Image (cartoon, rainbow, N blue to C red):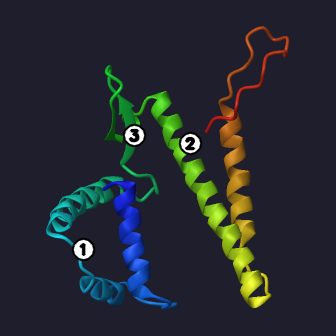
């Protein structure tokens, strides 16, 4: 689906829902069934395929008792420059793939922090009250992460100390 198609569907949805401030998903779907062009046969066929892919991917990414997924999704590039995604077992990841996973987790954490900050600002604007957030949990996780990130930094070979410090790698 192209971005233009996504925007058109979003506009249909916004128009159909009007100024409804709160709606559950089942009611929204029921309302959208009455909007011509929102749900299509082609869309249902693509949705069935996407559902199969999402369910399979979800099961692949499920975490074990240790909290670590058995498989992770990595992007690979073939000799022709074509990018694809593959699910790889954690022990089979190479260093670049581990870095790719760490970068993705940091990116998602930052995204969640951005949403958290927006929610905190909105709560203050709407209710004139600070949103109570357990920042101590985040601080504890960051404290535990720092020694791990520092543990394997490459050492400068010359020993002069004038080399640029490498970026902290996870």
Reply above or below: 40 against 21.
Answer: above
Disc 3 element: strand
Among numbered discs 2 and 1, the one appearing first in the sequence = 1
In the rendered image, the quadrant that contains the C terminus is top right
The spot of residue 135 in percent (x, y) is 74, 68
Among numbered discs 1 and 3, the one appearing first in the sequence = 1
The residue pinned by badge 3 equals 74
Labels 2 and 1 touching (C-beta < 8 A): no
Distance, label 2 to label 1, CA atoms, is: 39 Å
Labels 2 and 3 touching (C-beta < 8 A): no
* Rendered image: mark on residue 103: 2
At 19% across and 70% down in the image, what residue appears? 40
Quadrant for residue 73, please give it: top left
The residue pinned by badge 1 equals 37
Reply above or below: 63 against 135.
Answer: above
At 60% across and 49% down in the image, what residue appears? 106
Labels 1 and 3 touching (C-beta < 8 A): no
Reply above or below: 38 against 111.
Answer: below
The spot of residue 93 in percent (x, y) is 41, 33
Q: Left of 101 or right of it: where is 160?
A: right
The spot of residue 22 in percent (x, y) is 49, 90
The spot of residue 59 in percent (x, y) is 29, 58
At 24% across and 79% down in the image, what residue appears? 36
Distance, label 2 to label 3, CA atoms, is: 11 Å
Quadrant for residue 37, please give it: bottom left
């Amino acid at each position: 689906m192209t971005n233009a198609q996504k925007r058109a569907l979003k506009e249909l949805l916004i128009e159909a829902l009007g100024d409804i401030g709160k709606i559950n998903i089942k009611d929204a779907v029921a309302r959208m069934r009455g909007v011509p062009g929102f749900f299509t046969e082609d869309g249902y066929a693509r949705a069935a395929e996407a559902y199969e892919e999402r369910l399979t991917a979800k099961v692949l990414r499920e975490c074990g008792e240790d909290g670590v997924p058995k498989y992770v999704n990595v992007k690979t590039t073939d000799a022709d420059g074509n990018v694809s995604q593959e699910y790889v077992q954690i022990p089979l990841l190479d260093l670049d793939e581990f870095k790719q996973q760490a970068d993705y987790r940091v990116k998602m954490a930052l995204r969640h922090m951005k949403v958290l900050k927006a929610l905190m600002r909105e709560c203050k604007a709407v209710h004139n009250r600070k949103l109570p957030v357990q920042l101590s949990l985040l601080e504890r996780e960051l404290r535990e992460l720092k020694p791990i990130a520092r543990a394997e930094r490459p050492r400068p070979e010359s020993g002069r100390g004038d080399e640029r410090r490498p970026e902290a790698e996870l």
